Image (tube, rainbow, N blue to C red):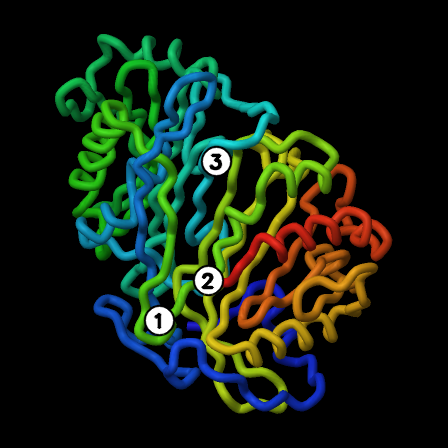
Amino acid sequence: MKKSLSFLAVLVLLAGCGESTPDSQQASGIPDGQTTQRPGYEGSDYPDPAPLKEKPHAQAVQVGGKPVIQACNLLSLNDLTDLGVKVGSRPDPNVVNFKRIYLTGDGKGPLETSAITYSQAPGEALNECTYALESKDSTLQETLSVAVSQPAYVPSAAETAAAFVGAPASITLGAVHAYSKRRPVPEPDASGEAAVILGDTVASFDFDLKGAGNAGKLQDIAKRVMQNLEKQTNAPAGPSTVDYASPVFPVPVAQPCPLLTANTVTPAIGAETSPLVTETPGTAVGDIVFPHDPQQRNYVQITCERGTGEDDPLSRKALSLTATSFLTDDAAKQYVENTAGAHGGQAPSTAIGDESKIMTDTLSVKTRGVLIFRKGRFAFELNVDDHDAHPDGISLAEANTLLVPAGQKIARAFQGA
């Protein structure tokens, strides 16, 4: 299995910047580069292939005066663990591996759905949770996804739910009904989508499971989604927080989503920030070796995006913030220096944090105009996601205008972890 550190990893490793500074004190008190094994992830070469944990939030979010049933609360990390289903292992944030789209309590911008009937998973949705699963051959070919539609943000949801009334259900649990449609796959694999309905809420549950993997657990997984829909309807909860518990990374990690507040995002994108949040946490503790430094450095990485409220990501104007947590200040310093050095890093108009650069590499949209800065053992990469207005990234001047004020707010708000 290949080690990874976001889209910048390979170039960082090849950057060849100057000698590393003497290592700072370990935040955790344990040496860097340690590894641990997890059952079901044998053969992984990541320091910790399965460190995720989940912190539920009791306070529900309201949209249009109604509580939101968060998709990730219908099939949570805790549910998967309880059912013996293992999430795919990758340290780089990736929308295929683990994606959380949820609605938060702030943001005045409108939500815009493209759904004609209801949002289907996996696809364009305002409220969705997607997992790739750890297959026996480590190919991550198995997936589970849930998307929730409610009338407050998908107006056709109530009409769609009513249209199913009287139709023969595949599974019924109390007042919850599931109507499934299978895709043609060889036995004993299982692939398809189900509309899970309670009242005026429609939850799309999509599954693609292998017979040698999790196909035998499909009924239990589907029933858990149905049970949770009833539970969340009766007592809605807010979006949970994905965190990490690892013997090789036993210190707090930086959470980027709370830093992307509406008053930080709105001035940078020139539009009202919506309640929509897209989060992609890395699902493993990764490691990296920097030039001229033989020590492997453990890290955890999470990416978050907030902006306008279209369910089509190519239609949004948004800020994207990637937070990379290391065990030492020195590792974060090397990451920033090597990354900026490999991508034409220039000084911003105002310094941010302990050090900061704006990348000007025109060879990659993903690095042109990215603001990278450090605070202690944490590195942050901030960029504009705007496919229509900025399909090729942004210039140095635009980054100074759009990103530096937002970066200053983020750096001031972040007090360490």
Query: What is the secondary structure assignment of the residue under circle 2?
Result: loop
Amino acid identity at mark 2: Ala
Q: Nearer the viewer, residue 60 or 353?
A: 353
Q: Which residue in the structure is indicated by mark 3?
A: 123
Q: Which residue in the structure is indicated by mark 1?
A: 250
Q: Which residue is at a point 33% across and 54% down the rendered structure image? A: 133
User: Mark 2 or mark 1: which is in front?
Assistant: 2
Quadrant location of residue 41?
Answer: bottom left
Quadrant location of residue 250?
Answer: bottom left
Amino acid identity at mark 3: Gly
Report x, y in % for residue 9: 59, 71
Q: Is residue 86 left or right of residue 334?
A: left
User: Mark 2 or mark 3: which is in front?
Assistant: 2
Query: What is the secondary structure assignment of the residue under circle 1?
Result: loop
* Mark 3 / mark 1, whichever is N-terminal: 3
How far apart are the alpha carbons under marks 3 and 1? 35 Å
Do the CB atoms of the residues marked 2 and 1 lie less than 8 Å apart? no
Q: Which residue is at a point 22% across and 26% down the rendered structure image? A: 230
Q: Residues within 10 Å of mark 2 (few under 14, many from 20)?
A: few
The numbered dot on residue 417 is 2
* Mark 2 / mark 3, whichever is N-terminal: 3
Amino acid identity at mark 1: Pro
Q: Residues within 10 Å of mark 3 (few under 14, many from 20)?
A: some
* Mark 2 / mark 1, whichever is N-terminal: 1
Q: Which residue is at a point 78% across and 39% down the rendered structure image? A: 389
Report x, y in % for residue 285: 41, 69
Residue closest to the far left: 174
